[in-house]
Amino acid sequence: MEEVGEVFTYFSRVGVAGINVTGNFKTGDKIKIGDLEFVRESMEIERKKVEEAKPGDSVGIKTPEKVKKGEKVYKL
């Protein structure tokens, strides 16, 4: 398990977590936020779909459940 980011906000209306990226990951990777594990189907930077994220990026990803600000994001 590798830490790849941290949640900085959650947009409850659309079910999207804002993540500050600290490691590399891509669409299709299995990730864990808190107790929630899922395969990320897509992610966006500035409302544009991207396939990969790298340290320093801020991305939005749809999550199946609410996540909390400050939770760490791990690639499984």
Image: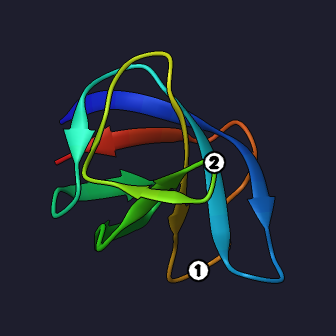
**17 left or right, relative to 34:** right
In the displayed structure, 51 sits above or below 15; it is above
| Residue type of the residue flagged with mark 1 | Glu
The color scheme shown is: rainbow
* SS category of the residue bearing label 1: loop
Residue 70 percent location from the top left of the image:
70, 36
Q: Earlier in the sequence, mark 2 or mark 1?
A: 2
Neighbourhood count class around disc 2 (C-alpha, 10 Å): few under 14, some 14–19, many 20 upward: few
Residue 38 percent location from the top left of the image:
30, 72
In the displayed structure, 68 sits above or below 40; it is above
> Could you tell me which quadrant the N terminus lies in?
top left
Q: Image quarter for residue 17?
A: bottom right
Seen from the viewer's position, the closer of residues 55 and 39 is 55
Q: Which residue lies most toward the front here?
A: 48
**60 left or right, relative to 67:** left
Q: Alpha carbon of mark 2 to alpha carbon of mark 1: how far? A: 22 Å
Specify the label residue 46 is tagged with: 2
Seen from the viewer's position, the closer of residues 23 and 73 is 23
Neighbourhood count class around disc 1 (C-alpha, 10 Å): few under 14, some 14–19, many 20 upward: few
In the displayed structure, 21 sits above or below 50; it is above
Q: Image quarter for residue 4?
A: top left
| Residue type of the residue flagged with mark 2 | Glu
Q: In percent of the image, x 72 and y 54: which residue is there?
A: 68
Q: Nearer the viewer, mark 2 or mark 1?
A: 2
Q: Which residue is mark 1?
A: 65
The reply to whether callout 2 and callout 1 are in contact (CB within 8 Å) is no
Residue 30 percent location from the top left of the image:
19, 60
Seen from the viewer's position, the closer of residues 47 and 39 is 47
**4 left or right, relative to 8:** left
* SS category of the residue bearing label 2: loop
Q: In percent of the image, x 52 and y 73: which residue is there?
A: 63
Q: In percent of the image, x 16 and y 64: which residue is there?
A: 28
